[in-house]
Amino acid sequence: MGKDSSDLFGPLDSKPASLRAVPVMVPLPAPTAYSYAVPEGMAVQPGSVVQVPLGPRQVIGVVWDEATADPVDPKKLRPLTLVFDCPPLSPDMRTFLDWVASYTLSPPGYVARMALRAPAALEPEPMVEGLRYCGVRPERVTPARQKVLELAEDGLAWTRSGLAHAAGVSLSVVDGLIAQGTFETVFLPPPPIVALPDPEYRPPALEVAQKEAADELFEAVEAGGFSVSLIDGVTGSGKTEVYFEAIAETLRKGKQVLILLPEIALTADFLERFQDRFGSKPGEWHSDLSSRMREKVWRQATTGEIRVVAGARSALFLPFDNLGLIIVDEEHDPAFKQEDRVFYNARDMAVVRARISDIPVVLASATPSVESQVNCLQGRYRRIHLPTRFAGAALPDLHLVDMRRHPPERGGFLSPVMLRGMKKTLERGEQSLLFLNRRGYAPLTLCRVCGHRFQCPQCSSWLVEHRFRGQIQCHQCGYSEPTPNACPECGTLDHLVACGPGVERIAEEVEKHFPDARTLVLSSDLGGVKRLRLEFEAVAKGEADIVIGTQLVAKGHNFPLMTLVGIIDADIGLSNGDPRAAERTFQLLSQVTGRAGRSGRKSHGLVQTFQPQHPVMQALVSGDAAAFYEREIAERERALLPPFGRLASIIVSADNRAEAETHARQLRQAAPVTDGISIMGPAEAPLALIRGRHRFRLLVHGRRGSDMQAFLRQMAINGPKERKTIQVQVDVDPQSFL
């Protein structure tokens, strides 16, 4: 229900009786819209993007549906100050935003703000100055001028630089014609940032299995309406080419497409493949875009000028003009979960948006999530399976390296088995990839004399040494300091020791064994997106012999010369209390080893582990993914864990530990008694201190059909009043348990 804006801003001058009141969703953590008056002569409708006074500021808001507001006398209200010249948010979009707010228990204003993340794009782009031939011939016609005239004589308008480029002449030639009065100035609409994709540009030659899969997706798009299809195919099986055909059919129908990718800023290979198929790149949407480019993408998506957008999870909240298909690539990837302010899983919300808009959604992965697997088994999703690699390329032969039987030399981390494999690969002129999901040089630094460990002063985490930068850094809050020479506790010089490996330390070991090899480290902390894209291109061109990387290297890259993949510490993801630990480890290792042999060369994978009998390791080397998922699904069902049960995490944080614990206990006591829902805790979160704030966690568990949201709302109503010093974060369907 709408709030009376006079309650916020005090008595107001009376307004003409002809004014009407409308609810406006503003970017505040308030549970409802606020009511404002519509000045005489101003036309608005539900979905209109407006500017309104909020205290001393002017903010952007959205006119919401009339049914959400209490009747309020417009005379008491402050007026709207501006209606932006942009398309209104559609009823489907407003329904989607309401649904996300309700499901995630987030303030609807915060959710609505995610659809308006480019404020400067709310007004139309300025016209571009152009030229049109006006019939006046120049006094002297040179060959260069003749080229320009031949293009311009048809009467079409050109930009100055566009005309010069098309004619193959310098700008000075065009400027000379302008000075002669040959052209008149006209104003042109701004050009689209990407050309229209052509579904007939370069149709692929699909193999039989791919063609059958593409036909199934074609039927889903042709039939229209809501459906969910899961493309489940081994790495290199051509999943992308298959869903490209669904995109092509959607474009033929004149509709737009959204492609969600977990790491759009790093997937230059995907953008090039899209351009090869459709003749132009898609519009991009991710955090590394300049603000100006984000504004253009937002505006042109809302007007329909951009037909395809490939983006990170936030692209899900772009207000498309005529969305007809959503693709979620690597649907299992944890990067689709946002854990800041509004906690949501973009994969699940993509399905919701498709259902509300009554359009198909396609999920794709070589290692689908357990949730998607169960949805297929229960008939909610259509499964499309691609069992073999494209062009008959074989999957890599995988072998476990038992580190108890084949330990590395003292001070090292690479088994002799791994080193022999790398040596043979180098001799064949092929590439090796070493994977370790740990940034920096070492995860812990301590003093040999007194045992002092370098810990972040603001977090309960160790400082990670980054030797390339000469720093030790906290990966939780970003705190860093120069790498010390002496222990701050006992003052001893040159007795600090790095414990455990990161990718930088593995690179040091590789250079010791293979000094002549071209070694490259790929990690998100070693450069921006542009540098990483260049490095990925260099690997694809064969300009590196040995690549050492974090999980960045697992996400869909195609390295033709890569024939050996080595997993340095396969057990690293199994050593925590995350109920998804086995699933995540299996997915990550399968994706990494899938980088090998994609061009058809014989390839190998070596997996260093201290637990060779673990079900994850056995499933990985046997290639029996079905058996692994069957076992994992049975364990989830037995424990009533998602998707057979429901979870919600509540993190209470405060500057004072006792205050955080007290508030968490009071919140626990306020929990309603409900059949099928139980609550555990509070207990200190595994990361008990982040950025100087103490954290306690409550974990709520319910059966699948339980109303988790109603339980959590009642708990908040019954619980202690929130104070400025206390922060409560609710995460429905948590992916992280730190």
Image: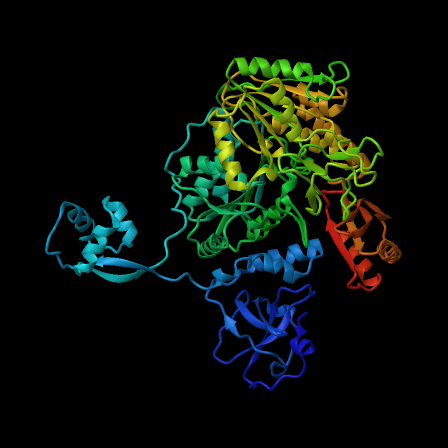
For the question of whether residue 267 can be seen, the reply is no
Q: Is residue 147 above or below residue 575?
A: below
Residue depicted at 71% across the width and 45% down the height = 476
Front-most of 674 and 559?
559
Residue 5, located in which quarter of the rendered image? bottom right
**The C terminus is located in which quarter?**
top right
What is the image's colouring?
Answer: rainbow
**Quadrant location, the N terminus:** bottom right
Q: How many marks?
A: 0
Residue 289 appears in view: yes
| Front position in the image: 508 or 310 | 508
Q: Position of residue 183 (x, y in %)?
A: 20, 59
Q: Position of residue 399 (x, y in %)?
A: 67, 16
Residue 401 or residue 693, whichever sits in front: 693
Instruction: Please indicate whether residue 206 sits to the left or right of residue 30 in the image.
Output: left
Taking the image as shown, residue 311 lies to the left or right of residue 656, namely left
Left/right placement of residue 299 relative to residue 702 reads left
Q: Position of residue 304 (x, y in %)?
A: 44, 54
State the residue lying farthest toward the left. 139
Quadrant of the image occupied by residue 375? top right
Image location of residue 126, percent across then percent down: 39, 62
For image coordinates 50% across by 40% down, the residue present is: 530
Q: Quadrant of residue 666?
A: bottom right
Residue 210 vertical placement versus 349 (above, below) = above
Give the side of residue 724 with respect to residue 295, left or right: right
